[in-house]
Every structure is written in structure tokens, then in C-alpha cells.
Amino acid sequence: MLSVAETFGRTALGIIMTGMGSDGLQGMTAIRDGGGMTIGQDEATSAVYGIPRCYAEAGVLRKVVPLPVLSRYILHALRYRVRA
């Protein structure tokens, strides 16, 4: 994720889904700090809400959404980024 943040800056898109631990927090923070979009899966639809919770509590996620609508947010972010 660090190289994505460095290479793509404000056009980067970071997505975190269900899982355990906190791997990638530094990289996702870099994406957010560079102006990129960061999206995480919500607790209700996560099998394990470890990584998404860690990112949400750290304030790294711009959006926290349920899995069934995640693709809609991704497409919206991509359309916005292409025009920007």
C-alpha cells in the first residue's frame, strides 16, 4: 500500500475487508494522507472485524460500508478519481 500511495497519490484507492490484525495500517494511512480514498467493510458484514476495526479506530477510513454495497462505493470512487 505504501507504493500505491507514493505512485498514485490522491488517485489511490485502498480497500480493507474482513480479517485479523493490523497489517497495512501504515500503508492505508499513507493513502489517506496522500488524498486517496480509503474504504473499509463494516462490522455487521465482516466475518472477523479485526483489521477493519483497527483502521476505523485509527481514523484511517473515509468510508465504512456493508459488503453488499462495497462495489457501488468502489465504482463511485473510480468515476470521481478519473474526472479529477
Image (cartoon, rainbow, N blue to C red):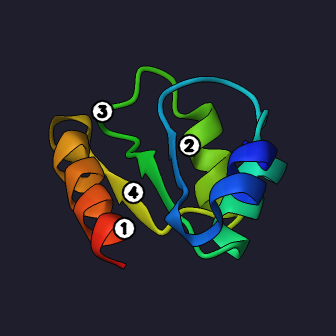
The reply to whether dot 4 and dot 2 touch (C-beta < 8 Å) is: yes
Q: Nearer the viewer, residue 25 or 79?
A: 79
Secondary structure under tag 3 reads loop
Q: Is residue 71 left or right of residue 1?
A: left
Secondary structure under tag 1 reads helix
Residue at 30 percent of width and 33 percent of height? 45
Q: Which amino acid, by three-letter code, is at mark 1?
A: Arg
- Marker disc for residue 64: 4
Q: Which residue is mark 2?
A: 52
- Marker disc for residue 45: 3
Q: Residues within 10 Å of mark 1 (few under 14, many from 20)?
A: some
Q: Which residue is mark 1?
A: 81
Q: What's the distance in space between the residues labelled 3 and 1, CA to CA?
A: 26 Å
Mark nearer the N terminus (4 vs 2): 2
Mark nearer the N terminus (3 vs 4): 3
The location of residue 60, given as percent across then percent down, is: 64, 64
Q: What's the distance in space between the residues labelled 4 and 2, CA to CA?
A: 8 Å
